Image (tube, grey):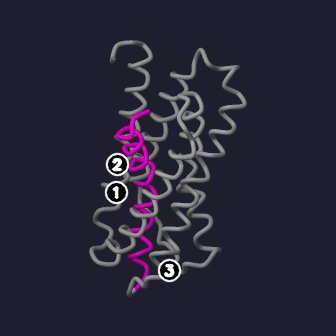
Amino acid sequence: MSIIELFIIAVGLSMDAFAVSVCKGLSVPRAKKSHLIITGLYFGGFQALMPLIGYLLGVNFRHMITSVDHWIAFILLALIGINMIREAREESEELDASFSVKAMLPLAIATSIDALAVGITFAFLHVQIVPAITFIGVTTFILSVIGVKIGNLFGAKYKSYAEIAGGIVLILLGTKILLEHLEILV
């Protein structure tokens, strides 16, 4: 997997965390440095951890499903992308203004479930996992920090656009993987 493809996946996966970060920024009158760091660490950390877990699961089961791995990658990425687009169109509930473990942990887990499935895909594609999860974690950290600032400065206007863009990116990547395997795209 090229660095450009990895960057696209990292940005796509980060969009849920970015959207929630925008909401967290909206929930406070002033975004403090601690809000930025806490949000970035939670979301970036879980976006790095979940693909690792998915990768380890995928490596253990790869031998059983190698003949259909490209279909699994396509279906997982397409479903994740479609779900992100669907969620962007729904009314979002108000977020708690707290940055406590109780408030942040469920958000970090919820926004990184998609990354678990991507980690499974990474196992099928023989992606070097340590650089990949580092890249995803750092990208998510940065975009989460930016999201809190944007939310605090500009409001909720950009939240759904970020989710839609992330969903489209993941669908396109899944399609690319499938087309390459079917040798339609070289």
Categorize mark 1 by other alpha carbons within 10 Å: few (<14), some (14-19), many (20+).
many
Disc 2 marks a residue whose amino acid type is Ile
Camera-side residue: 67 or 29? 67
Cβ–Cβ below 8 Å for labels 2 and 1?
yes
Residue 161 among those drawn in magenta? no
Q: Spatial distance from mark 3 to mark 1, Cα to Cα?
A: 20 Å
Find residue 21 and report its image quarter. bottom left
Find residue 143 and report its image quarter. bottom left
Bounds of the magenta segment: 1-28
Q: Secondary structure at mark 1?
A: helix
Q: Spatial distance from mark 2 to mark 1, Cα to Cα?
A: 6 Å
Residue 157 is situated, as x and y percent measured from the top left of the image, at 28, 65
Image quadrant for the N terminus? top left
Residue 170 is situated, as x and y percent measured from the top left of the image, at 41, 39
Camera-side residue: 7 or 109? 7
- Residue labelled with disc 2: 164
Cβ–Cβ below 8 Å for labels 3 and 1?
no
Kindly identify the residue that appears in the image at 39 percent across and 33 percent down.
173
Disc 1 marks a residue whose amino acid type is Ser
Residue 84 is situated, as x and y percent measured from the top left of the image, at 43, 47
Q: Secondary structure at mark 3?
A: loop
Kindly identify the residue that appears in the image at 48 percent across and 75 percent down.
37
Disc 3 marks a residue whose amino acid type is Ala
- Residue labelled with disc 3: 97
In the shown orientation, is residue 39 left or right of residue 106?
left
Residue 164 is situated, as x and y percent measured from the top left of the image, at 34, 48
Residue 18 among those drawn in magenta? yes
Find residue 101 and report its image quarter. bottom right
- For the image, the number of numbered tags is 3
Q: Is residue 31 above or below residue 112?
A: below
- Residue labelled with disc 1: 160
In the shown orientation, is residue 17 left or right of residue 119?
left
